[in-house]
Image (cartoon, helix red, strand yellow):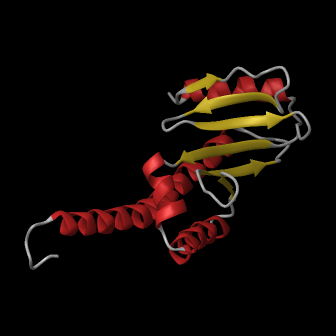
Amino acid sequence: MVKIPEQLKNMIIDWCKQDNIDCKEIPQKEDSVMIWNLGIGKPEMSVYIQHKLHDRIYFQHRIAFTDEQQKMINETWQKSKKNSMILNLQRNSVTFDVFQTFLGGTGKITGILEYLIDSNPSFEKHDFIKKLLRIQQIQTITFNILNTSLGTEMNILKQQQNAKDSKNPLTG
């Protein structure tokens, strides 16, 4: 049974209500590439259908880096550290069969988009819950990789700064 996009949107909203999952419709601009977009869960992720590809449903989450993280990744880190983090994230996307896009431009990374696509014409509640839980788990793993990469490096930088600021001759 093939569902039209509006029916599918209403079904997803109903499924979220049934399972007590936060769900809100995100208003679309007139020139938007999306037919509809729902913000689901906490942290919020998007579930949407596009005009051009209305036979596919997208499950997407976005991770935006703080200004401090952007500065560290794009300016402070050696290229090898940045490449290592990117490699670990890309390995994660291949392992879990998720699409990944790095946000930013001109060699700067400001965040990450990760998304799954489903083109099952008989999309049912169990498909929705399965994809939702899967993208949430992938998001958790991505956060863990980022926390390990960024957190460790931020800690090292703070320790180096503290050592420079210390008046102890043994640390400087």
Give the vertical position of 88 relative to 17 (above or below): below
Relative placement, left or right, of 92 versus 69 is right
Give the vertical position of 118 relative to 94 (above or below): above
Residue 163 figure quarter = bottom left
Front position in the image: 32 or 36? 32
Give the vertical position of 148 relative to 140 (above or below): below
Visible in this render: residue 140? no
Front position in the image: 9 or 74? 74
Residue positioned 28% across, 62% down in the render:
158
Residue positioned 32% across, 66% down in the render:
157
Q: Position of residue 79 (x, y in %)?
A: 56, 74
The quadrant of the picture occupied by the C terminus is bottom left
Relative placement, left or right, of 71 versus 39 is left
Q: Position of residue 80 (x, y in %)?
A: 54, 78
Count of marks overlaid on the render: 0
Front position in the image: 77 or 103? 77
Residue 31 figure quarter = top right
